[in-house]
Amino acid sequence: MGDSRDLCPHLDSIGEVTKEDLLLKSKGTCQACGVSGPNLWACLQVSCPYVGCGESFEDHSTLHAQ
């Protein structure tokens, strides 16, 4: 079986994210509009602390990813 990075090139940009990091971010708010969970998305790119709301709100997570 090959390296998982062969399956998805985006894996190269993912930083070290712990379960605790994600739990902390899930209790926060969207950094663009301030809405709170449960539909928040955390950016997983290296050194990016961004948390944005999902499609059921203003969808700032998608805007951030573009």
Image: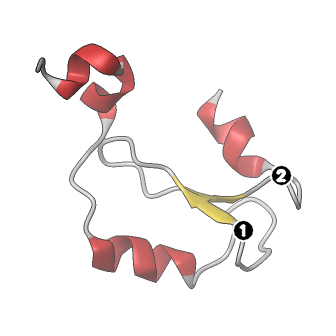
* Residue indicated by mark 2: 55
* Residue nearest the observer in this picture, 21 or 38: 38
Q: Position of residue 22 (x, y in %)?
A: 41, 71
Q: Is residue 42 above or below residue 14?
A: below
Horizontal side, residue 40 vs residue 1: left or right: right
* Residue nearest the observer in this picture, 1 or 17: 1
Tell me the element at label 1.
Answer: loop
Check residue 39 in the rendering and tell me which mark sits there, or answer none. 1
Q: Position of residue 47 (x, y in %)?
A: 31, 48
Give neighbour class at mark 1: few <14, some 14-19, many 20+ (Cα, 10 Å): some
Check residue 64 in the rendering and tell me which mark sits there, or answer none. none
Q: Quadrant of residue 65?
A: top right
Q: Quadrant of residue 3?
A: top left
Residue under the image location 30 percent in, 30 percent down = 11
Q: Position of residue 52 (x, y in %)?
A: 66, 58
Residue under the image location 11 percent in, 20 percent down = 1
Type of residue at label 2?
A: Glu
Q: Earlier in the sequence, mark 2 or mark 1?
A: 1
The quadrant the C terminus occupies is top right
Q: Is residue 50 above or below residue 9?
A: below
Q: Quadrant of residue 58?
A: bottom right
